[in-house]
Each structure stands twice: as structure tokens, then as C-alpha cells.
Amino acid sequence: MLKIAVLVSGSGTNLQAIIDAIVRGDINGEIVKVISSRSKAYALERADDHGIVREFIGAKSERTILQAVQESGAELVVTAGFLKVLPPEFVEAYKDRIINVHPSLIPAFCGIGFYGLRVHEEVIRAGVKVTGATVHFVDEGCDSGPIIAQRAVKVKEDDTPESLQKRVMQEAEWPLLAEVIGLIADGHITVMNGRVIIR
């Protein structure tokens, strides 16, 4: 059973998608810890509701996120709406064991400053017809690690950033993240020479 640590900063909808997938039996794993960079993140309440160990680690804390994850025994780290850049020592310690979900088809609409509603605002402003979500391994850059999987979502003529965000989450982010974690838990995903191999 795969031991998972989830890093959060906000409402925790991606966390909930992982929890739901575990409950359904789609992921052979357990969340051993939820760590938040914000003390009032609703994601912490979601963890409480499901009896998951949770911790707030702020910028002024002497305790590091790396220390907390290592103590949890997690084998996979999922950054789910986590609005902090992981330090190089964390990325090195968990190389090819940290994944992130991003609400666009990387390399489009990603990188520094592209998170939350701004991604969807820029998609609509650019007039593209297809967007989606990407799950990728985390490296030292921003949204630059090896891509594991992507799922496309059509942009409708009457979409607002809010309506597009909701549809991308429901049709792409949540199911794709759960699917990838399930594949990792079952040993179907590896990284060789910087490229993802799915068996």
C-alpha cells in the first residue's frame, strides 16, 4: 500500500479527489499526512473529517516540510494546490517521487504566476479552443518536470474563467490525478533518463 503525503494551501479539492479515489478502491494507498502552508486552509478540515494526520507549517516555523514528510514515512508526495516552491533539498530527497497537477496542458499557460483562476483567464484571453490538466513530476523548476499524463477539455464560447475552472477540475484535474496516483501505487510508472514510462 502506497504511503502518500499531500501538500496543500487552499480548499483541498484535489485532496478530496484523492481521498474519494482511495475510498472507492481506485488507489491502493493511504494518505499518511496532509501538510498545509496556510493555517486556515479548508483542506485541513477535510483531513480532520477523514481522520488523517495533518500539520500546518508556516514560513516562520523552525520545522521544515521535508522533515515532516520524512517523519510520516511517505513514499509519494503530491502537491495539490500547494502555493510554495519546494526547496532543492526537498526535490532531491524525493526525486521522481513528487507529483503535481496543473490546470492547463503544459507547456501552455504554466510557470511562475500561473495558478488558480489566472490560468483560465489567460486561456480565454488567448482564444484557444482546448485546455485541460497535466500531472507531472516535480523538479527544481516551475511546472517543468517530466509530464506523466494530460487530459484535454474543450473551451466553450460562453465560458467564464470560473466556469472553465470548474469544468477542468471535474473533467480533468480530479480524475487524472487519481488515475496517475493509482498507476504509481501499482508500480506502473517509472522515470528513465528524464522521460516517463507507463507500463
Image (tube, helix red, strand yellow):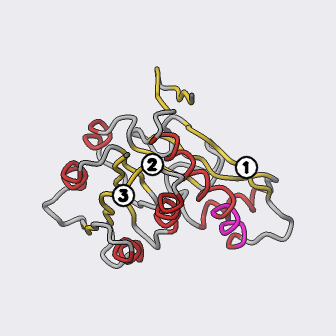
Q: Which of the labelled discs sits on residue 31, or is there none?
A: 3
Taking the spot 49% from the left edge, 59% from the top edge, the residue there is: 18
Label 1 vs label 3, nearer the camera: 3
Taking the spot 41% from the left edge, 61% from the top edge, the residue there is: 83
Most distant residue in the top direction: 193
Quarter-wise, where is residue 49 in the image? bottom left
State how far apart marks 2 and 3 are (Cα).
11 Å
Span colored in magenta: 163-169
144 and 92: which is toward the camera: 92
Give the percent coordinates (x, y) of residue 138.
43, 42
State how far apart marks 2 and 1 are (Cα).
26 Å
Side (left or right) of 134 relative to 74: right
Taking the spot 48% from the left edge, 62% from the top edge, the residue there is: 23
Q: Which residue is mark 2?
A: 28
Residue type highlighted by circle 2: Asn
Q: Which of the labelled discs sits on residue 50, or is there none?
A: none
Residue type highlighted by circle 3: Ile
Question: Which of pointers 1 and 3 lies earlier in the amino acid sequence?
Answer: 3
Question: Which of pointers 2 and 1 lies earlier in the amino acid sequence?
Answer: 2
168 and 170: which is toward the camera: 170
